[in-house]
Image (tube, rainbow, N blue to C red):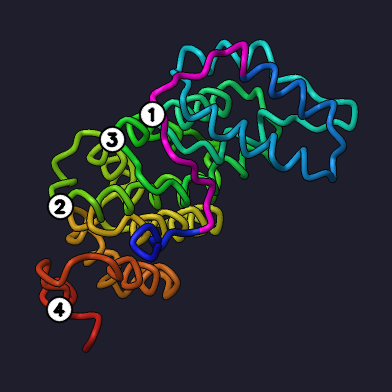
Amino acid sequence: DSEDLYVTNILYERETTKREATGGEVAELVWKLCLAHSASYETADLFMTLVFELRRLSLEALRALWQRSSFKCRDNWQPLIDAVPSCATEACVVLMKDLIASGEVEEDKVEYFFWSFTFVSNPTSGMIESLAPLLKSPRASQSCFLGVTALVHRFCSAHSSCDGVPAVQSVMRTLGKFLGGNCTVQDSEHLSKMQLVLKAVGNAGLAAASLAPALSSCASLRSHPLEIRLAAVQAFRRIPCSVRVRDLLPEVTE
């Protein structure tokens, strides 16, 4: 019947049920994945089932599961560490933040975690609140800045008053401190970091409106390297027209 048809995407989806998964059931799934042949249909089905079951676990249950089932299979594969980024619940995002902050996962997996944030379809303020402190780390990478701000952008696209959400304000305050008012840089290393921060500000979208005056200063100072001035202009790309970009950049277009 055509009335039963609807348009969807190809992301991991399954009809929701009220039954809650238990940590023991999910741990058993991880074991089954380790025992299954790596290139079989059974493995693909088990992996998708693992993702769906992770979505039903609380943060407490996820943490307990990690302690119990974060082992590597005989072929060095860690099913749980690959499944958590596809889970996309607040509990899974907080678990990933915990693992990143504690250094429990290898660098390539940390990057995988950060890039997965760009695909979270229903971000929450709790996710952003959890991830915001990672931006302050001296080791914060490009994927950290862009992954977190992509999450902010998607959240703000769904919440018109997101600039009043404390978690969003925390992220933008951190980025604003990096800008320092006018994006002054001392050396080439600082220049690269400033370019990354400006890219992250632009990536944040609607939330970046609060930093428009600072971006204007960054773009207008003729003493700044051209790369910084251009990056500051590009950071306006998702800021609403109501901020009156032309008024904020009187000297740049002259």
Residue of label 2:
160
Residue at figure coordinates x 42%, y 56% from the top left = 185
Q: CA distance from mark 1 to mark 3?
A: 9 Å
Of labels 2 and 4, earlier in sequence is 2
Q: Nearer the viewer, mark 1 or mark 2?
A: 2
Residue of label 1:
130
Of labels 1 and 3, earlier in sequence is 3
Range shown magenta: 10-25
- Seen in the picture, residue 90 relative to 71 is either above or below; the reply is below
Residue at figure coordinates x 26%, y 35% from the top left = 167
Q: Nearer the viewer, mark 1 or mark 3?
A: 3
- Give the overall secondary structure of the magenta segment: loop
Quadrant position of residue 131: top left
Residue type at mark 2 is Ser
Residue type at mark 3 is Ser
Residue type at mark 4 is Arg
Residue 125's label in the rendered image is 3
Q: Is the C-beta separation of discs 4 and 1 under 8 Å?
A: no
* Secondary structure at numbered mark 2: loop
Percent from the top left, x then y, of residue 51?
58, 34
Q: Is residue 96 magenta?
A: no
Q: Nearer the viewer, mark 4 or mark 1?
A: 1
* Secondary structure at numbered mark 4: helix
Residue of label 4:
246
Q: Is the C-beta separation of discs 1 and 3 under 8 Å?
A: no
Residue at figure coordinates x 18%, y 38% from the top left = 165
